[in-house]
Image (cartoon, helix red, strand yellow):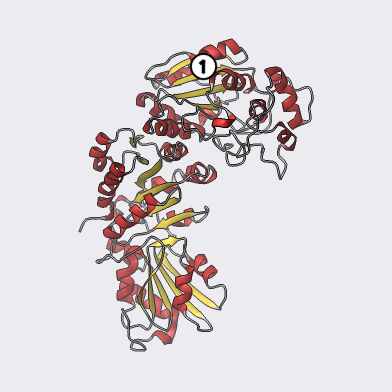
């Protein structure tokens, strides 16, 4: 795989990086629901670098909600997983960067996603596999959308992982209130009922995200629900 | 005689002991056979409960973490229900694994259509690069299971059935075997169909090929069997949906005029219970029915006594 060591980018550079994909120079962080949580994860939490993508002991981040991956690509570019020059090609025939990411094409991307409800079951298997291989330090993170939690496959995974005590498994739910039917009791309550450690935070507050991401949760998987402003109507179903 | 499925847990238990890369994922079905293995290898024998989407996703996740997953349940719940998981979690992610089904097309007829999966191989045919093993005997099942697990990071489907031939043949996980040679057509018998096909073609001047690995399709063996004539007639007898391998045979014979008759399980739901033999007969796959359909297709050239069968 092609990896690259770019000069260090900071959070303030992300709008400009996203602008290279969309052509819109005024991309603010509010333009995307996942940007802040992704940044805090890659900047301060995940133990993974471009050079360590072949290391079985690296942390894994699985973007299950593969829709609207500009923030993801921007963060990966900022952290040197992919060349920033690739960003301009976003969605083009000969670009590795599609409107849904592909692990086979993009360095640093752990799963190809787009169809909702696949990342969390894959993360369960990955967590089990790392445990079986004795990689006891490696953590698995998977990002899902609040509406994506409607998919039955996710409910299968949540119901299994809690009682199975998969403490290396972490779910980040980006809650932009896009599900058509609100969950009585909230998203975190569903996880808690299945035996997970759960916390809901402001998805724009970097310190709150960091604290929630790093809180201990022995013996249990962990979910962090990151609340962000409601999504504007995009006219497309299944955009999570 | 034991069944193919009786071999599954003992074979995999040994492979779990021998190879730290092997992992087994179950969804309740079949777990009793793995009780010892689950005790000895609790991290590598995983039962996710009655959750088939999670079953397949977990198997693929294990592969992402570097293991060799073997995923098992009934064919309906393994291939049909979580089909998109097979397509995306293995195929699109570019990882491999072994899917092992039981119950086949109608192993439990009294259980009805909910537990029948005649379309599993045809469904996998919509995906790229799956090896498909259809053993015809428990000994062959054991051999092919070992081939499947040992096949690097390939994507492999192993289809176990209670339907079985009396004798095992020396299958190698790749090629068709020539069981009989004749001049007036080729009959390809897939897995458990061999005994019925041999009985149906007794005394006919036809070649019989035995296929236990149907994908990739051994086109070379078929071309060899049809010989150097100007045209070819081929019958394929499969224990799943009729016509599943017809296009593969067409591709193999694209260089010469040919006809292919695909026999197998009918598309229409039978909506009957009973036993396996009754379903074999109802789909026209018993020896008597097969003989009529094969001779009807091949015509006069195969009339009895036209050539001696060669074993």
Drawn side of residue A5 relative to residue B251, left or right: right
Q: Quadrant of residue B134?
A: bottom left
What chain is tagged by disc 1?
A
The residue sitting at 30% across, 50% down in the picture is B111
The residue sitting at 46% across, 46% down in the picture is B96
Q: Nearer the viewer, residue A169 or B40?
A: B40
The secondary structure type at the circle numbered 1 is helix
Please say whether residue A125 is visible from this viewpoint.
yes
Drawn side of residue B100 relative to residue B153, left or right: left
B182 lies above or below A83: below
Please say whether residue B119 is visible from this viewpoint.
no
The residue sitting at 50% across, 56% down in the picture is B125
* Residue identified by numbered label 1: A213
**Crowd rating for badge 1 (residues with CA inside 10 Å; few <14, some 14–19, many 20+):** many
Q: Quadrant of residue B238?
A: bottom left
* Residue positioned most to the bottom: B306
Give the image location of residue B219, x and y in percent: 48, 69
B225 lies above or below A162: below
B274 lies above or below A95: below
Give the image location of residue A48, x and y in percent: 54, 26
Dividing the image into 4 quarters, which one contains the N terminus of chain B?
bottom left
Give the image location of residue B185, x and y in percent: 43, 80
Q: Nearer the viewer, residue A160 or A38?
A: A38
Give the image location of residue B249, x and y in percent: 49, 69
Q: Quadrant of residue B162?
A: bottom left
């Amino acid at each position: 795989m092609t990896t690259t060591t770019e000069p260090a980018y900071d959070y303030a550079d992300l709008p400009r990086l996203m602008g290279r994909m969309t052509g819109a120079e005024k991309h603010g962080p509010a333009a995307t629901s996942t940007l802040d949580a992704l940044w805090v994860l890659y900047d301060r939490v995940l133990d993974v670098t471009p050079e360590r993508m072949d290391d079985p002991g690296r942390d894994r981040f699985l973007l299950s909600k593969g829709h609207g991956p500009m923030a993801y690509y921007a963060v990966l570019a900022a952290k040197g997983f992919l060349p920033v020059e690739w960003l301009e090609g976003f969605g083009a025939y000969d670009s590795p960067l599609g409107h849904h990411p592909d692990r086979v094409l993009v360095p640093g991307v752990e799963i190809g996603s787009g169809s909702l409800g696949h990342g969390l079951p894959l993360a369960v298997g990955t967590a089990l596999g790392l445990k079986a291989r004795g990689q006891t330090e490696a953590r698995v993170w998977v990002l899902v959308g609040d509406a994506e939690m409607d998919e039955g496959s996710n409910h299968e995974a949540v119901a299994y992982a809690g009682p199975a005590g998969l403490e290396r498994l972490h779910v980040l739910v980006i809650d932009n209130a896009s599900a058509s039917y609100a969950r009585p009791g909230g998203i975190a309550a569903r996880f808690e009922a299945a035996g997970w450690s759960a916390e809901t935070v402001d998805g724009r507050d970097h310190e709150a995200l960091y604290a929630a991401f790093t809180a201990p949760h022995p013996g249990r998987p962990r979910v962090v629900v990151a609340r962000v402003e409601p999504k504007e109507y995009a006219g497309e179903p299944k955009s999570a | 005689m034991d069944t193919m499925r009786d071999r599954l847990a003992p074979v995999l238990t040994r492979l779990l002991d021998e190879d730290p890369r092997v992992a087994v994922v179950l969804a309740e079905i079949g777990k009793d056979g793995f009780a010892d293995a689950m005790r000895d290898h609790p991290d590598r024998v995983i039962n996710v409960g009655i959750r088939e989407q999670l079953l397949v996703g977990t198997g693929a996740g294990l592969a992402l973490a570097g293991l060799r997953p073997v995923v098992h349940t009934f064919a309906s719940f393994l291939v049909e229900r979580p089909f998109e998981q097979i397509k995306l979690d293995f195929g699109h992610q570019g990882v491999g694994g072994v899917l092992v089904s039981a119950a086949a097309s109608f192993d439990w007829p009294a259980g009805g259509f909910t537990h029948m999966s005649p379309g599993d191989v045809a469904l996998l045919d919509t995906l790229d690069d799956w090896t498909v093993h259809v053993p015809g005997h428990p000994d062959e099942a054991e051999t092919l299971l070992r081939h499947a697990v040992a096949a690097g990071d390939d994507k492999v489907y192993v289809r176990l059935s209670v339907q079985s031939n009396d004798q095992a043949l020396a299958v190698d996980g790749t090629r068709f075997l020539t069981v009989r040679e004749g001049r007036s057509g080729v009959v390809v018998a897939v897995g458990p169909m061999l005994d019925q096909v041999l009985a149906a073609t007794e005394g006919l001047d036809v070649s019989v090929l035995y296929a236990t690995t149907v994908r990739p399709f051994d086109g070379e063996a078929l071309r060899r069997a049809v010989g150097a004539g100007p045209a070819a007639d081929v019958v394929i007898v499969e224990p799943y949906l009729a016509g599943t391998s017809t296009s593969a045979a067409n591709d193999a014979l694209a260089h010469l005029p040919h006809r292919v008759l695909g026999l197998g399980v009918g598309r229409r739901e039978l909506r009957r219970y009973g036993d396996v033999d009754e379903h074999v007969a109802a789909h026209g796959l018993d020896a008597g029915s097969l003989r009529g359909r094969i001779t009807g297709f091949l015509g006069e050239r195969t009339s009895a006594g036209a050539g001696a069968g060669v074993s």
